[in-house]
Image (cartoon, rainbow, N blue to C red):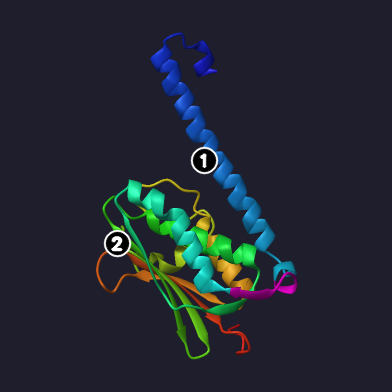
């Protein structure tokens, strides 16, 4: 309505830009709410389970995010084994990794660093996303997985649903998800630990 009342082209352009931003936010929120709804319950754990090479999946997603990272001067890197198989739903696993990378980039200032790691250790496959962003306190480390919770004074936009989705997908794959302060310096480290195929579940 505000845009419709404007006659000045510059003011109209500004109003339309705000509308576009609002639509993008609403679309992202709706998509995340739908994803969260799909991950809840037992259906995911019972259907569409198949071997997924987590190393390949993460490598592909890092390539998708590289341009955005470069635009902000963020060093987005990957340290990974050649192959790391887990059993799960490939669509949901892709959503899990996407949310973690998106979260790391959102909370990392321009010129920072985000490193994705896929590690195999004994009967485990470990995904780590390490960033040099605003970090996380020990007190908030669990709260960030609650729906709609956002880190205070983060200076960034978001719905507060990304990590809630990550934890729900992890639980559906007998995995554990954590976010902790980065022991190497500023920032945080998100970690998801999966059982390797054939190993006992982690529940």
* Residue at the spot of label 2: 132
Residue 52 relative to residue 102: left or right: right
Is 82 drawn above or below residue 78 in the view shown? below
Residue 202 visible: yes
Is 46 drawn above or below residue 30 in the view shown? below
Q: Position of residue 131 (x, y in %)?
A: 34, 63
Assess whether mark 1 and mark 2 are in contact (beta carbons under 8 angstroms).
no
Considering the image in quadrants, where does the N terminus appear? Answer: top right
Along the line of sight, the residue nearer the viewer: 128 or 73:
73
Q: Position of residue 107 (x, y in %)?
A: 36, 54
Point 26% across, 73% down: residue: 184
Specify the farthest residue to the top.
7
Q: How crowded is mark 1: few (under 14 residues within 10 Å), some or many (20 or more)?
A: some
Considering the image in quadrants, where does the C terminus appear? Answer: bottom right
Point 57% across, 71% down: residue: 170
Residue 106 visible: no
Tell me where the magenta segment starts and ends, as one range. Answer: 45-52
Q: How many marks?
A: 2
Q: How crowded is mark 2: few (under 14 residues within 10 Å), some or many (20 or more)?
A: many
Along the line of sight, the residue nearer the viewer: 4 or 54:
54
Indicate the quadrant where residue 168 lies.
bottom right
User: What secondary structure is marked by label 2?
Assistant: loop
In primary-sequence order, the first of circles 2 and 1 is: 1
Q: Position of residue 58 (x, y in %)?
A: 49, 66
Indicate the quadrant where residue 198 lies.
bottom right
* Residue at the spot of label 1: 25
Query: Is 50 part of what is drawn in magenta?
Result: yes
């Amino acid at each position: 309505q505000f845009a419709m009342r404007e006659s000045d082209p510059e003011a109209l352009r500004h109003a339309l830009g705000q509308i576009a931003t609002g639509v993008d936010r609403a679309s992202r929120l709706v998509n995340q709410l739908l994803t969260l709804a799909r991950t809840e319950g037992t259906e995911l754990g019972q259907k569409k389970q198949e071997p997924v090479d987590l190393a390949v999946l993460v490598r592909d997603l890092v390539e998708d995010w590289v341009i955005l990272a470069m635009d902000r001067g963020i060093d987005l890197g990957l340290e990974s084994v050649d192959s790391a198989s887990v059993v799960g739903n490939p669509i949901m696993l892709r959503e899990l990794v996407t949310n973690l990378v998106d979260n790391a980039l959102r909370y990392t200032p321009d010129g920072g660093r985000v490193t994705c790691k896929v590690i195999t250790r004994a009967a485990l496959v470990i995904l780590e996303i390490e960033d040099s962003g605003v970090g996380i306190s020990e007190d908030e480390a669990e709260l960030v997985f609650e729906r709609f919770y956002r880190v205070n004074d983060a200076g960034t936009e978001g719905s507060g649903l990304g990590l809630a989705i990550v934890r729900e997908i992890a639980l559906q794959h007998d995995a554990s998800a954590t976010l902790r302060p980065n022991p190497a310096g500023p920032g945080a480290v998100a970690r998801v630990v999966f059982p390797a195929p054939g190993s006992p579940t982690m529940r």
